[in-house]
Image: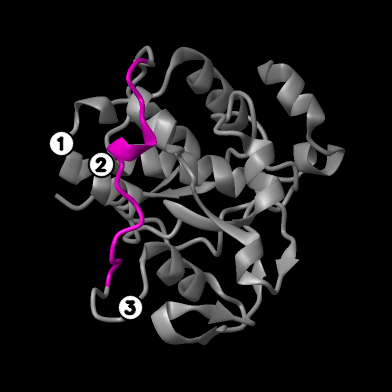
Amino acid sequence: MIKNLLRGLTPLALILSPLAAPSPALSANVVMLPDALAELTEAAEEPDGFQAGAFPHWNAGLDATDGCDTRSEVLLAEAVDAPRTGEGCALTGGRWISYYDGQSVSDPAALRVDHLVPLAEAWESGASGWTAARRERFANDQGATATLVAVTARSKQDKAGRDPAGWVPSDAARYCRYVGEWVSTKLRWGLSADKEEVEALKLFADGPCEETVVIRSAAPE
């Protein structure tokens, strides 16, 4: 499946090494993807017992006084052209570029705010042992730009909760960024990766995404 996934990417994507957003200067908090991948803990998934309700979302967000929940705050933060904010934080107008497929979207109702590392994936990778409060912090995390992302409904449905062994964005300008931020999110929250997931990530890290940078950050306690 992993090799089939790589074959499914465009030829341009296999030649170029697109970076995640503009690369910051290397520091203690910034590493290349192969080095970041080496920090991941490999472990079998724990598939039993997941319920979306174990990760309360959306909560009041970063500003509990603005009337906007986490989802709305993410949309406001990621807007290319700012929407109008009405009563109850109702958003109208504005424009966004969908993270997964690059589509330009001008209707906020057509967007989904996706957990880049899906809630079920997090549960199976270690979050099943967390407190409910920590799971809520993960589900509403705005402290790292890639934990929550605005995407088209179609691209979220296409992803279908799969990890990079089964799905990455097909666009050459996006899939290396996605892989790098997947690893960054797992490291931020101390989540493990299963064998097939690690093998897929290694194919990217040793090939077209070798020069992708990964930003280290610590999750809130």
Proximity of marks 3 and 2: CB atoms separated by less than 8 Å: no
Range of magenta residues: 48-62
Q: Which mark is residue 67?
A: 3
Q: Is residue 80 magenta?
A: no
Q: Quadrant of residue 49?
A: top left
Tag 2 secondary structure = helix
Give the crowd class for mark 2: few <14, some 14-19, many >=20 residues within 10 Å.
many
Tag 1 secondary structure = loop
The residue singled out by tag 2 in the image is 135
Q: Which mark is residue 13?
A: none
Report the front residue among 24 and 113.
113
Report the front residue among 45 and 174.
45
Q: Where 82 falls versus 171 (above or below)? A: below
Q: Nearer the viewer, mark 3 or mark 2?
A: 3
Q: What residue is drawn where x is 61% and y is 31%?
A: 204
x then y, percent, for residue 176: 61, 44
Give the crowd class for mark 1: few <14, some 14-19, many >=20 residues within 10 Å.
few
- The kind of residue on which mark 1 rests is Thr
Q: Let me know if residue 12 appears in the view.
A: yes
Tag 3 secondary structure = loop
x then y, percent, for residue 174: 66, 50
